[in-house]
Amino acid sequence: MKNYFSKLLLVLCIFACCGCKKYLELKSNSKLVTPHNLKDIQGILDDGEKINLRTTPALGESSADDYFILPASYGTLSLFTQSLYRWAPEDIRWGNDWNLAYQAIFNANLSLELLQKVERNSSNAQSWDNVKGSALFYRSFHFLNLVIQYGKVYNESTAERDMGIVLRTASDFNIPSTRSTVRETFVQLISDLEASIPLLPDYPLHKMRPSKGAVHALLARAYLYMGKYELARIAANEALKFNQTLMDYNADPSIVPASTSVSVRKLNSETIFYAEQGLSTIAHGITRARIDTNLMASYLPADLRRNVFFNFISGYAQFKGSYTGSSGIFFSGLATDELYLIRAESNAYVGEVDMAMNDLNELLKKRWNKSVPFSPITASTKAEALEKVRTERRKELLMRGLRWMDLKRYNREGANITIYRKINGQLITLQPNAAYYALPIPNDIIEQSGIPQN
Amino acid sequence: MRSTNAGIYTKRWNILLITTGLLLMLLSVLSVSAQQGGQSIVKGSIEMADSTIVVNISTKYNGSTRPGANGRFSIAIKRLPDTLTISALGYKRQVFAILTGKESFNISMNAAAFELADVEINTGYQLQKANEINGSVSVISSAQLNARGGSNILERLLGQSSGIVNNVGKSIGNVMNKTGLSVRGLGTFNGPLDPLIVLDGFIYEGDINNINPNDIEQVSILKDASAASIWGARAGNGVIVLTSKKGKFNQKLEVNFAGSFLVRSLPDLYLQPNMSSSDYIDFEKSLFDRGYYDSRISSTPYLALSPAVELFLKRRSGTITASQADAAISALKQTDSRKSYLDEFYRNAITAQYSFGITGGSQNASYLLSASFDNTRSETYVASDKININFSNTIRLNDRLSLNTKVYFTTLNSASGRPSYGSLNTGGRDVPYLSFRNADGSPASLDLTYRSVYTDTAGTGKFLDWKYYPATDYQHSISKTSREEIFFSGALSYKILSFLNATVAYQYQRQNDKINSTSDEFSYAARNAVNSFSRLNRTTGIVTYNIPQGGTNFLNQIWSSSYTLRGQLDLDKRFGRHKINAIAGLEMRDNHAQSNATIRYGYYADPLSYTDVDFVNYYEHPITSNLTKILSGNALDNTQYRFISRYANASYTYWDKYSLSASVRSDGSNIFGASTNDKWKPLWSAGLGWLVSGEDFYKVDWMPRLKLKASFGYSGNVDVTRTASAIGAYSVNNTSLLPYTRIASINNPSLRWEQLSQLSIGADFSFKNDRLTGTVSYFSKRGSDLYGPALYDYTAWGGSSTLIRNVADMKGSGFEADLHSINLIAGSFTWTTDLFFNYNQSKTVKYYSPGNSGLFTLIGGSNTITPVVGLPLYAVAAYRWAGLDNSGNPMGYLNGQPSIDYNAIVREANTTGTNLTFIGSAVPLYYGSFINTFRLKQFSLSVNFSYKAGYYARREGISYASLVLNGRGNGDYQARWQKPGDEQSTNVPSFTYPVNAARDGIYTNSEINIIKADNIRLDYLNLNYKFSGKLRSLGLKNIECYAGLQNLGIIWKASRERIDPDYVSSLTPPKYLLFGLRGGF
């Protein structure tokens, strides 16, 4: 017996010396990983809730002029939301556009860093490239959204000096934030996007992932914002090569006209890349936002968008036509209708009036009630064409987070658009090219990082 | 696949149980016949009043024994002369000399007020005499555990010892403090706060409710750092060691039984001041008239409205006449939800507990087999049954080898009851005038989510009934939980040398839970699910069902198991004046949990069937037209944690006066992401004891016993997110259906361990004749490098506004006293008192988090730990109150002047904080209990008062924003400012529209709403009667019957508010009546 015990103790001692490490190597939670292989890294980029879904900036749309709030609804808003609506925001802190976008950017940066440790070989080349291309795309997509909201409008002559955003390209949080210039921001995102084209597939596995078409579409949007119409036209053209479908609002299966809350299904055939605006608490939420009455008056009776896009409540229009399949969530991804309009606008700008009108009519035909004869829009001059395209752009791309960038670039070109808010009988205005067009960066970011405020 | 696994588990487990049982039976039979002879044996009998108390009979040279059921004992004597010592908790120790080895003793034990010296304290790893321990330990006997009723062992500890407190209201939703208990206050902000629970020497990972209090013999609470050094990092908050009852050697077969009933009063729903139905409806009317509901009705016309608003709407559209509307409204005004709930859903809760046990033992074997049955019907008709079977066995196989085994088996079944107060609302609004029956007594419907006008017409009569009937729905939606748990432990010890013992111990615990929630075809849940995914073709009238008709069934199965394997050496050596007592061991633990949840639609229990549905595609909701997917509750989980620990603990005693102890422990684990270097953490403690009264110079007659003791030690705590690389969790995105890797927290390699240290100094003393005995101790705790959220530049990640960093230091200190006195002995009458007193305070010493450290963070939230330098961890601050102005607006201070610029007031509070006032601690600084026991012959009456003092609570004031937006009423409404001059007599602001949440906040968080929470409660009043010898002729003995009134509530409080300061926003636990009988034959 004594012997037996000594042996047992000996076994225990041996186990104590050698066995511990192995015993403790068992994985404690089957769902957890230390991401290291392509599947894990692709997974970081497929975290839709952090990258695509309710993540893109919304303050720009809330600050724009496509909607207004009735006095009774204004009273029920929180003081904070009221202040956003008045263009005089109270203390903006955590829980904002900034953190949503930079969380997506973190995922992209972390993926790129982890990818460096995975060897690219003939058997994994396709998925390796997709990870790299996707990370570059996602990062650029969010950089562009951020610079549109927080940077001064792109101006060739001052872009070298104008403050842009924080260009974070590494996941280490010990690296201090600094503000780049507007030009640096665009150089970074355009070169990243160009680098991603050969890496990405023609068509994605799912529309929440990028594709060649999506990169060209994003480039088209970026160039349009920069005022580089020739480049925008080329990019839009390239993008439309992959998908030029336009939904016929008369019959498309993704259109649900009778519904009171949803009219257009999610992931429909026009969608190239799927993304949604963040924060639902922002001022342009559908329960209180009513669409500008002048804008509403511009929809003709046979324009199907009147029913597809809007509900009418006590005579005012409420927007419900987002490409998200949900009334409370606003689309902010890329779709073919935007590309038609970019191409039309670029053509108009460079003087190709007919080509511009072609694209415009191509789109409007699909929005027209087929039982009423459609009379195409025409323009004789470049200015007229540009004016008509831009009007239609506003009517089609409502509440997609694009109006803020449009106001900024139109004013850069001298459109001189002053926007108004009427609050408790008082008229508040936002002057063209006002400093406020570069929206304020959250105060806690300024406090913690020391970067300059706009 | 998963269900087959479950089957295998159950089968394996049954086989294990049966095999173990048979083996143990066999061993006990064998060992009974293997008795030994050849020595001299001393015999005797012991007589004492309470035979449930464990008596320890020990000799100097041949170990110890316990008396049999009849009080008789015999003990072998190896060497002469020897000393026989008889001791028992609560009785005076007696010592006899054994000279011939043939003596026989008839000993009568006399009650002592309190004698700890000879109590064996179980630290889980070893049994130690109280006088050999330099740490702080409280021991609670089974008699003390019996003072209170109920089936939760932890609740029974309260008020029976110092150093332990129930953090009322602080633990709700805090995963770090699931037990709600804390031992000696706090040592950390964000780390674990729960004491570690140990059952018979092993960490207990199961649900504490599984353990039947009747099976517990003794509870030790290890309070100081020596506890942590024995039990490792998880013991930083103290250890509660549960020791279950066991058989005794040399004991005839004895049968014990006990039965008790506990009847609880109905909860007092009327204690919380509430807005009257009449006021509420008038208020709704005013909102309606202002057009508040119009935008909601126009944009989401289908969402449920309150019954009164529906009536206003009908009146406005002219579908009812003014007199019809008035009649209906006045009927609603007469309705009180509280009465409706009480009538329909409440009853007196009853708990019945029965237990039955057999114990016995020969010279070399002892056994205990007991079975208990608990049956509870809660006040909302939740029914639960619990069965415990306990089988323990100790066998001395030979001189050197002994085996100790225990099997503890629990089954627990419960079924959901009726809706509890406040759980039902309409359209998300808490309406105080709900009634669940129509005038004719038939079940009334309640618009839970959608308005009746929509649910009635959505399917043009082709859909299932879409209404919710609270009065009957609970009969159709029932959630059943069934649990089976087995806890097995076995320890084989071998005496290598006379002073050296080796033990190999193994413990295995498995718990299988099955939660089966079935909503049958008639339930609202099932009908709502079917209708929500039905599609009506309006031309053909054909309904397409995407969810088939029938019920829904949600099944969640959880299997958890843990094992511990331990090898330990015990050394117990005395040479001359020196005594060394040491243990060293190695332990490995594995804790494995798996779960599998599934949801089935179109479910019928009889005949059993279900239908598969499409969880992928979106369908249009017939009422809201939102596109939604069918809810899938399917989930799989698998976690397996492993730990390896090495520990050693030694104490050295010189001359039985001075002792020194030290211990060391290190733990390793496979917690995810922890890098190898971080897996080991040594902890240590040291203790010193001095029996002053043992010194020759000690000549204090009135205090014959005095011992001083001190201990100091370190423990630590590590955050699992302390990882060098990012950790991702796998899941699947709902939209893309692609798997994703969620980075839930940013990797932060620079985190260090939290360091917790505790110094404890104490004294044990007894006065002459043990008239007053007790322990006093002082402790001081220090936590440094504590984790806390610190603001950072979230441009780096964006996933959180704060990062967990080592940001803070805290300090806590306290004083404890346990005093036991015999106040009066007059013939057969005795009066004894037990007083437990605690003083405990904590404060933040250092906190590094710029912009987040002022008084402002203490506003409102007194229920969470909020670090502010120099202030208690749980603390309250409030706005200084400047009264109401002559329009009924609440005034705070701005730049020292009364102001109604609420945004500016908030800004000042958040920056300089000069318009705030620090009120005090939100947890009691002083607390304890005071128990008086009167015994007259066989009667005893015990009265326990518990007291808490030195803290504050915030009463809930009215928030008009919350009333308008969520429909939450408040009793303040009646006292609100209504006309100029009212500001003289009330502090409740006027109602303004539109609402201003900042204005509400200044009032609800102002100093006038902070109340002093000090109170004294009458905890229990117990009457006990022990039958005398008469019943022995019937073969019965120790028959005892008792009755008690418990939780009698507050008898004094410092504040004049009606509400219970410990339960400002929840229901006070109801009073109950307990009565029962126990005895044996």
Image (cartoon, helix red, strand yellow):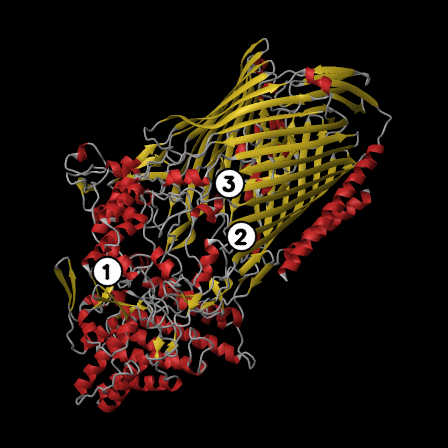
Q: Of the two numbered discs 3 and 2 on the same chain, state the one appearing first in sequence.
A: 3
Above or below: residue A26 compared with residue B20: below
Is residue B995 in view from this perspective?
Answer: no
Q: Position of residue A305 (x, y in %)?
A: 28, 75
Q: Measure how far apart labels 1 and 3 are at the Cα level.
A: 50 Å
Which label was assigned to residue A84? 1
Same chain for the residues under marks 3 and 2 in the image: yes
Q: Nearer the viewer, residue B145 or B986?
A: B986
Which label was assigned to residue B517? 2
Left or right, residue B103 beside residue B528:
right
Q: Position of residue B486 (x, y in %)?
A: 66, 45
Q: Nearer the viewer, residue B512 or B721?
A: B512
What amino acid is labelled 2 in the image?
Answer: Ser
Which label was assigned to residue B381? 3
Q: Position of residue B724 (x, y in %)?
A: 50, 60
Task: Check disc 1 and report its element: helix, strand or loop.
Answer: helix
Left or right, residue A418 beside residue B188:
left
- Of all chains, the one bearing label 1 is A
What amino acid is labelled 3 in the image?
Answer: Tyr
Q: Tell me which residue sits at (17%, 85%) in the image.
A: A384
Q: Residues within 10 Å of mark 1 (few under 14, many from 20)?
A: some
- Of all chains, the one bearing label 2 is B
Task: Check disc 2 and report its element: helix, strand or loop.
Answer: strand
